Amino acid sequence: MKLNDLKHTQLAVIGGLAMLAVCATTAKADGAPAGWYLSSDAGINTMESFRHVSTEPGGRWGLEGGYALSLSPQLTLGTELETGILYNNLRSGKAHGEATQIPLLANLVLNCHVGKWVPYLGVGGGVENTSISVGGGGYHGTDLAFQAQAGLRYQLSDNLDVGLGYKYLADFTSRNVTISNNALLLSATYHF
């Protein structure tokens, strides 16, 4: 695990503990929605440079579906499956190329309901199909992937919320290269 990956993990743990402390000290919410949900997010993705390849900002789109378990009046735990696509342009010297990643992840997302505001924190893991081509070379494979996420949503109604979130995705390739992505995303979630 690289030092940068360790820093992200430490920040996620500290954020999770802070979120639990806020939930434990706030007044009861109106009731956290438990049950099935479907969510989509889209935004800017930055891929960290690797092996003399520099990257340009790109995009990320995701689709998540899952079930939220009620842990208390303020807390729910979402168990979900996620897929989507990440795309970035690449440069290596004068050569240009592209990277496309398609993750399939199982996530656990802890939600803290404080009135209509919902801060959340999550982790996930699974596989990712990665396709990188630059300067006549490249890499194509399906690799293990890890994700950490955090954000804030606002409940517009009992069934719909919108939010702003951050996702860190690391893909551990068979060539001993970690491909790290940072995404800032807008989201919408529908609760059935």
Image (cartoon, rainbow, N blue to C red):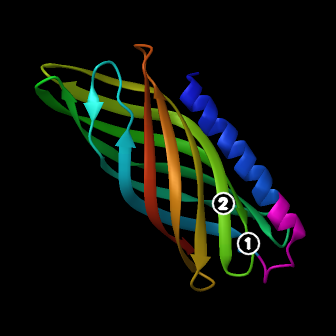
- Kindly indicate whether the residue at mark 2 contacts the one at mark 1 (C-beta within 8 angstroms): no
Residue 148, percent across and down?
Answer: 59, 44
Tag on residue 139? none
Q: What amino acid type is highlighted by mark number 2?
A: Tyr
Question: Is residue 79 located in the magenta-colored stretch of the structure?
Answer: no
Mark 1 belongs to which amino acid? His
Say which residue label 1 marks.
Answer: 113
Q: Is residue 59 visible?
A: yes
Name the N-terminal-most of marks 1 and 2.
1
Residue 140: x, y in percent?
29, 24
State whether residue 108 appears in this view.
no
83 to the left or right of 148: left
Crowding at mark 2 (Cα within 10 Å: few <14, some 14-19, many 20+): many
Q: Position of residue 65 (x, y in %)?
A: 54, 59
Q: Secondary structure at mark 2?
A: strand
Label 1 sits on a secondary structure element that is loop
Q: Quadrant of the rendered structure where residue 6 is? A: top right
Residue 120 shows which numbered tag?
Answer: 2
In this rendering, the answer to whether 102 lies above or below 34 is above
Report how many numbered discs are placed on residues in the image. 2
Examine the image and state in which quarter residue 119 appears.
Answer: bottom right
Magenta-highlighted residues: 21-31
